[in-house]
Every structure is written in C-alpha cells, then in structure tokens.
Image (tube, rainbow, N blue to C red):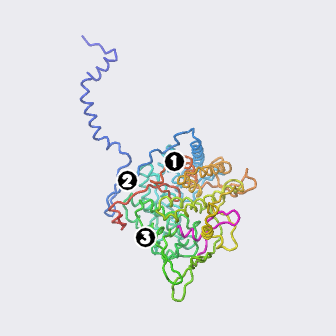
C-alpha cells in the first residue's frame, strides 16, 4: 500500500531532514569549523600589502583602522548636530550639481552648469571629496566614485599636457591615501602607488627640488612662471610620500622627499628665515622674501605635521622647529636661546599690530641679515635695544593674506604637541588666539560676512613700533597692566584656511566661540554663494549690495575637501577624526599617524629612540 504524502508541518520537516537528533553532531562540527576559520574569512580591513621592495618586509596594509564611527551626528536633536546636518546637506547640493553637470571632469562651473578640466582632467573634485563622503557617511556617492578611481590610468597623458606637481600631490595623492586610511579599500592604495610613481620624474633636478609640472606619460617636466621652485612646492609632498613609502615599502618615495629635507637641515639660513623661492639647480635660496602666505604657507605646515605623522620619530624635522640657536653679542660672547626656529622666526619677524584696533596680523617681508664687520663676525643689537633687536632689517608689505589664516591652527597644534618652555608656549598660544580673531574679523567686517583674498592693514609710521614682539616687550616691562597682551583685546566687529584654524582652535581650547564664528561663516556661504547647481566664489565680498554680490563661475574642489569637511567636523561634538591619531594635509585630507618599524628606520637612517 503506497504511503501517504506528509500533510502537517512536522511531517514535512521530518520527510526533508529526518529526525532532528541526527543533525546535532553535524551542526556542532560545523560550529567548531567556523570557530577556527572565521577570523580568516572576516578580516577587519585588507591584508598586508603584497609588496616586498628593496628587501623591506611588507608593511601593514592598514596601519590605522577607520574611526569607530564615520557618519552623521548621533544625536539629531542637538543644536550643533543639526548644524552639522546642514553642512552635509550643502555637500549633497554641491556634489549633486557636480554629478549632474561635470561628473569625471575636474570641476563644476556652478553658474552656467558647465564643466572645466583645469587639474589634469582626471576628475579632481572626485578625489578631493572621497574622504569627505566617508566622514559624512555618504556611501552611495563613495561607491560610485570608487568605480571612477578603479578605471583611472594616471600614466596616460597628452604629449603637450603637464600635471602640476604640488596640486596633484595634495589633492589627488592626498585624497587617495586619506580615503584608503578611512576605508581600507585596496584599489585606493594601488592607484596612489601608480600616481606616486608617475610623478617621480618631477624630482629629476640637480638639487632634487621638484619641478613645477610633469607629464606623467613621457616624464618630461617644466618650470613655473617664477623660474624657481617655490618653498611650498618643495616642502608640501613629504607627508604624502612618506606615508606612501610606509604602505608600499618603496625606498624611492622616502628618499626623494627626505633629500629635500636634507637641504633644509643644512641650509645657511639666518634666524630661521626660510625664503619663498629656491634655485632648483643649486639648491640655494632664490630671494630674501619671508612669508607664511602664497609660495610658503603649506611648507610651514609640513615642518610640524610630517614630524607628527611619522610618530614624532624624525627628530631632524623637529630640530628645524626646536633647536639651540647660537647668537653673538658685539663682544662675541655667546647667547644660548632655545627657539622654535621656523615658528619663532615668524613671531619675531612677521607679526605686527595695527595702531588703532590693535589687531594682530601676519604679513610678508623682505628680510636682510645683520651687517658684518671686516673680521666676518656677525653682530646683533644688544637686548636693551627695541628696534631690530637682532640687527635684522625688515621691509614688510603689511598685506594680510587669507592663505595665512592656517597659521592660528598650526600654532595651536604646536602648543599641544611640542614640549615648549612655558614662556614660548604662552607666546604661541597668544599668537594663535590673536591671529584667529583677526582672521575672523576679515570675514565679519565685510558686508557679505565672507573674507577677501587679502587685506592691506593699517600700520605704524615706524615698522619697528608695530612689531608684535616689541609691543609685548613693552607690555611685559610695564608689568602686564591690561591683563591681556597686545593683539588679544577683542572688540566689536565693524560690520578655508580659516575654517581649519577655527576647528583646531575649538578642539584645543574647548571655546565654543570658534564654533559660533564658523556657523556665521557657513550662514554667509549659504546666503551669498549658493546657486542652482552648487556654490560659487564671490568676486567682491564687501559689496554694498549684500543681497546680490557678484559671483564667479567656479566651484574649486577644495570647497568639497576643506571648507565643508572642516565645518562638518567643527559642528560635530564627537571627534570623528582624532587629532591624536590623524594629521590633516594642507588640502584637509587626514592621514593616520604611524611609526616606522625597525627595518624602515635602518633602511632610512632614522635614529632609534633612546
């Protein structure tokens, strides 16, 4: 008699699987199997990079895992969290316009809705925005961009085309390395390695200083319009290339950029005054201009930041900042003074105060060393003289550049990471706060609430009277009568580099004033720069018709990389990118702090810590 088909659920299960007891040994065995092989199936991050260059062992493929939380603020009801969401919405608006009208081209033209290829035609806005997408949790945008990166071949370039070395390193290479550090996606490291390699011919000069631009297919190079190598060009590639050397194990990446640092270690520089231009053939200074603005800004950044990035292990870099300076009195006796060579030279020679509002500002200046006697001994003025106390002559322009507004953040970062004598630390903190306030006022004083590229500052009849160090000395002699030093006496207002400083000043001081100022700037951006397709630059920030300022048809990629990223981080209570674990390059791409291993230190002649 044929058996009846099962009709109830227990009967169906028994027919398919038999008695449940029979499965118990199999399930237990499978569980033990997963216990042993699970860690190999579900690795957190990619495996070590499969390269073994120049005999070095493969370095770790992902030395720092992404932050614990990368995404939107956790508490959407909090005031600052709501403001962070507003910034995220601004990024979505800007990037949507780029995707719709300019995708895979370099930049969007936000007024006309057209596109432009002004940085190699590789889609610089994509590379500059990769880590911003990750930080804001915009995964769909990121995944789409990753496809563009995967298909890219940096070695293809028209014969008459050239990639500007400086911009390509900080935007493209920095963007790839930062996104790799945050995501662990191996293709990003592969493309960073490809790009780093094809840019190397830029270093093929007598001095090793990079040329202005390189053709990534032929290796041909060309110089810039100045005929010299800018200090910013020479010293704004070390962070990216040293991190790339650490990830790939390739000597040439480290050697090329450290060779430039060797020139700086041995440079015959007076009082830490590094000029803005250098001869690519001789490796010697090409002018006497000292500045923290155009031609030099990011070089100052990288002196401190590359030391922090490499785990504070390369003390030669630190020695450019902190070292024993030997000066001579007129009687040839030695004065030993512990100085921040580069940073103190800025404070000693470039910081001035306006005579009316007592605003502290930084400018550029022609700097000339002290005169020499016939016996070739350098002299300085005695410490009782207030004018040119070191015998160095100044010719300041009293132009205050917006590019210089990175300096408050850099000084604040230095006071929290360098072991400074108390007096130096106090002075650097004062300079950071005073300069930060003046940078903010260059925005607040304008009708639009947005800052100009540069401002001409009122100055004293005699430049020496306006030098901040001289004003401080007089204030100290009087017993600090006003409580706050000159240049820090904030008053009411008469009406991207800064955004970084606002963020670092808030993180290092905890003062919400810096966040409030950042919110006012963001409101001005929304009010005056927003267009149908994205955000545009303003041609005139102090127009008397603030409701309709003239706009420029451009949306630079750094608006996505720097401005919106720093504003988002400024308004987010949680420290998504901890300053103790990451260092931002000059394009706001965070790179993880790492330590050279034993083999790397031996290969690169980096002294072991005592």
Looking at the rendered image, the quarter that the N terminus falls into is: top left
Are dots 3 and 1 in contact, CB under 8 Å?
no
Residue 6 rendering spot, x and y as whole percentages: 31, 15
What is the CA distance from the residue labelled 1 to the residue labelled 2? 22 Å
For residue 259, which numbered disc appears in the image?
Answer: 3
Q: Secondary structure at mark 3?
A: helix
Question: Vertically, is 330 above or below 339?
Answer: below
Q: Which residues are magenta?
A: 343-368
Which residue is more in the foreground, 6 or 375? Answer: 375
Q: Is residue 554 magenta?
A: no
Q: In which quarter of the view is residue 469 placed?
A: bottom right
For residue 550, side relative to residue 65 (left or right): right
Residue 285 rendering spot, x and y as whole percentages: 52, 76
Question: Vertically, is 177 above or below 320?
Answer: above
Whichever of labels 1 and 2 marks the residue nearer the N terminus, that label is 2
What is the CA distance from the residue labelled 3 to the residue labelled 1? 35 Å
Residue 178 rendering spot, x and y as whole percentages: 47, 54
Report crowding for label 1: few under 14, some 14 to 19, many 20 or more residues within 10 A (C-alpha).
Answer: many
Which residue is more in the foreground, 376 or 247? Answer: 376
Report crowding for label 2: few under 14, some 14 to 19, many 20 or more residues within 10 A (C-alpha).
Answer: many
Check disc 2 and report the residue beneath it: 61
Residue 142 rendering spot, x and y as whole percentages: 49, 46
What is the CA distance from the residue labelled 2 to the residue labelled 3? 25 Å
Which residue is more in the foreground, 215 or 599? Answer: 599
Check disc 1 and report the residue beneath it: 133
Looking at the rendered image, the quarter that the C terminus falls into is: bottom left
Question: Vertically, is 580 above or below 225?
Answer: above
Q: Is residue 345 magenta?
A: yes
Q: Is residue 281 visible?
A: no
Whichever of labels 2 and 3 marks the residue nearer the N terminus, that label is 2
The extreme right residue here reads: 544
């Amino acid at each position: 008699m044929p058996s009846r088909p099962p009709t109830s659920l227990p009967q169906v299960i028994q027919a398919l699987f038999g008695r449940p007891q029979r499965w118990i040994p199999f399930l237990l065995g499978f569980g033990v199997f997963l216990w042993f092989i699970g860690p190999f199936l579900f690795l957190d991050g990619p495996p070590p990079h499969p390269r073994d260059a120049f005999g070095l062992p493969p370095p770790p493929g992902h030395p720092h895992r992404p932050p614990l939380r990368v995404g939107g603020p956790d508490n959407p009801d909090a005031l600052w969290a709501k403001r962070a969401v507003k910034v995220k919405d601004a990024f979505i608006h800007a990037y949507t316009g780029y995707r719709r009208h300019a995708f895979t081209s370099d930049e969007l033209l936000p007024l006309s809705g057209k596109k432009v290829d002004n940085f190699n035609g590789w889609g610089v806005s994509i590379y500059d925005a990769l880590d911003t997408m990750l930080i804001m949790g915009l995964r769909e945008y990121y995944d789409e961009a990753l496809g563009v990166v995967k298909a890219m071949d940096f070695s293809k370039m028209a014969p008459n085309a050239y990639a500007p070395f400086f911009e390509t390193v900080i935007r493209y290479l920095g963007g790839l390395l930062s996104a790799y550090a945050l995501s662990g996606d191996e293709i990003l490291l592969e493309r960073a390695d490809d790009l780093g390699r094809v840019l190397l011919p830029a270093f093929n000069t007598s001095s090793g200083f990079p040329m202005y631009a390189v053709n990534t297919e032929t290796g041909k190079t060309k110089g810039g319009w100045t005929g010299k190598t800018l200090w910013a060009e020479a010293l704004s590639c070390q962070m990216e290339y040293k991190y790339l050397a650490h990830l790939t194990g390739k000597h040439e990446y480290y050697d090329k950029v450290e060779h430039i640092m060797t020139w700086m270690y041995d440079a015959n520089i007076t009082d830490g005054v590094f000029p803005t231009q250098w001869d690519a053939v001789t490796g010697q200074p090409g002018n006497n201009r000292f500045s923290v603005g155009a031609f030099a800004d990011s070089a100052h950044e990288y002196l401190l930041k590359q030391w922090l990035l490499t785990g504070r292990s390369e003390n030669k870099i630190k020695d450019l900042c902190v070292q024993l300076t030997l000066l001579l009195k007129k009687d040839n006796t030695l004065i030993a003074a512990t100085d921040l060579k580069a940073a103190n030279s800025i404070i000693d020679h470039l910081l001035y105060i306006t005579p009316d509002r007592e605003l502290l500002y930084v400018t550029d200046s022609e700097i000339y060393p002290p005169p020499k006697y016939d016996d070739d001994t350098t002299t300085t003025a005695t410490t009782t003289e207030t004018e040119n106390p070191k015998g160095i002559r100044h010719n300041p322009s009293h132009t205050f550049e917006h590019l210089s507004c990175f300096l408050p953040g850099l000084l604040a970062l230095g006071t929290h990471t360098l072991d400074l004598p108390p007096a130096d630390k106090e002075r650097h903190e004062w300079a950071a706060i005073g300069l930060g306030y003046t940078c903010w006022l260059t925005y607040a004083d304008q009708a639009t609430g947005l800052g100009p590229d540069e401002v001409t500052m009122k100055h004293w009849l005699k430049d020496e009277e306006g030098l901040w160090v001289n004003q401080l000395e007089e204030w100290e002699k009087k017993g600090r009568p006003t409580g706050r030093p000159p240049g820090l006496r904030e008053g009411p207002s008469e009406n991207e580099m800064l955004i970084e400083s606002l963020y670092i000043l808030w993180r290092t001081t905890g003062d919400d004033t810096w966040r409030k100022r950042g919110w006012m700037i963001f409101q001005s951006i929304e009010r005056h720069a927003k267009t149908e397709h994205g955000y545009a630059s303003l041609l005139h920030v102090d127009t008397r018709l603030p409701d309709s300022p003239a706009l420029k048809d451009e949306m630079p990629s750094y608006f996505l990389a720097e401005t919106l990223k720093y504003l988002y981080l400024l308004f987010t209570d949680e420290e998504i990118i901890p300053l103790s674990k990451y260092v931002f390059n000059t394009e706001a791409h965070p790179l993880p702090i790492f330590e050279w291993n034993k083999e790397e230190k031996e290969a690169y002649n980096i002294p072991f810590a005592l």
